[in-house]
Image (cartoon, rainbow, N blue to C red):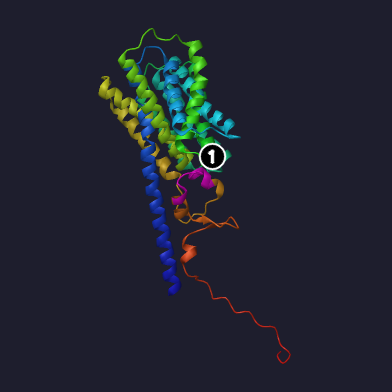
Amino acid sequence: MRDSSTSNDSGAGAAADGLRTEQRLVRISLVTALAPLVWGSTYLVTTEFLPPDRPLLASTVRALPAGLILLLMTRVLPRGIWWVRATVLGVLNIGAFFYFLFLAAYHLPGGVAALVMTVQPMIVLLLGALLLGARIRLLHIGACLLAAAGVALLVLQPQAALDGVGVLAGLLGAVCMASGIVLTKRWGRPEGVSLLAFTGWQLTVGGLVLLPVTLLGEPLPDRLTWGNIGGFAYLSIIGALLAYVVWFNGIARLPALAASFLSFGSPLAATVLGYLFMGQTLGPLQLLGAAGVVGAVVLAQRGTGTSPGTPRTPAASAAEGGRHGNDEEHQHEHGRHDAVSGLRVHPSSLTAPSTGPAPRPPVPPPGPGRK
């Protein structure tokens, strides 16, 4: 009777832990989704407030000042191997990604460029399996296909045309973003380095990579209006400094695939803002596409969690939770590692009474008068 009661209590505790974990992931996902939603406003700000035909200038001003501000605030530079890692992440997440994104936008209609970028979660899925030990499930593949169909209905126009350079740039941009997400999960953050410093490294590297390309490839505007200055300030402070702090925090605490699906909030936000402020229309197919995008994001969030009581390998833990994603909550909800053996120990095993038979006392060896 006592064994049954203890088992029920343990099962109820595991279910409660699983519910708390799922609720925490939902909260983190909602906060992280703010970054792609802000990025979705970039098109509106660029067309309405920035000097025309200056995509590289907009990218550089968006990244470099924000990175330098964070470096001045934190006054922390990389050390050792992190010089290389910060450079790689800065190029993938910021510099190369921005360049390929704008190159695709110049050679492709916006809808086609967005559609090409929907291969990004599939790349994350493959790289996650190779580098993070994450499992590929049919639900993941279904979510990728649903997201691609949703974006196609949302932004693709009948007069859209393909261009080889634009398609290649879009694919390379998707590879950069996917690789940046997976490597950020794999490497985590160096011990003792704040999220602000970590974000500042990447924005600075990305801005420095873009700076010579901008100076060589685009003429500087003859003059700047107050509207231009306000637009640049919005892109740098809101669209880069704050948004990327939120984004990298989410990557560290969410499964890599779940985080990658949140990027679909960007075309969704761009479509809604175009409807609200630029007189664009939303037809039934676009509304259906928006519902498909939201459904794909929800599927990805639910499909990457771990059910209560499921054993988690270190590789899977890194893929799903990140090395530096709220360690105290992670230890409370998923157990801790024994300091000597390295094995994971669930908190219930530290307090719950043993349900097995009591150990038998050792039998003393026979003495001189005993047999």
> Looking at this view, is 30 or 292 the one in front?
30
Residue 149 visible in the snapshot: no
Q: Position of residue 363 (x, y in %)?
A: 65, 82
As for residue 324 lying within the magenta part, the answer is yes
Instruction: Please state the extent of the stretch shown in magenta in the rendering.
Output: 316-328
Mark 1 crowdedness (10 Å alpha carbons): few <14, some 14-19, many ≥20: some
- Quickly name the residue at label 1: 190
Viewer-proximal residue among 116 and 94: 94
Q: Nearer the viewer, residue 164 or 33?
A: 33
Whether residue 356 is visible here, answered yes or no, is yes
Question: Disc 1 on helix, strand or loop?
Answer: loop
If the image is split into quadrants, where does the C terminus sit? bottom right
Residue 275 sits in quarter: top left
Check the image and report above or below for 367 versus 75.
below
Q: Position of residue 283 (x, y in %)?
A: 28, 25
Q: Residue furthest top?
A: 222
Q: Amino acid at mark 1?
A: Pro
Q: Residue furthest bottom?
A: 369
Q: Which residue is at a point 37% across and 48% down the rendered structure image?
A: 23
User: Is residue 333 covered in magenta?
Assistant: no
The quarter of the rendered structure image containing the N terminus is: bottom left
As displayed, is residue 270 above or below residue 363? Answer: above
Note whether 43 is above or below 129 in the view shown: above
Q: In the rendering, at what x and y percent does residue 121 appear?
A: 47, 34
Work out which residue is located at the far right of the displayed protein and give it.
368
> Residue 62 in the image: x percent, y percent?
42, 22
Give me the residue at 57% from left, 75% from top.
Answer: 359
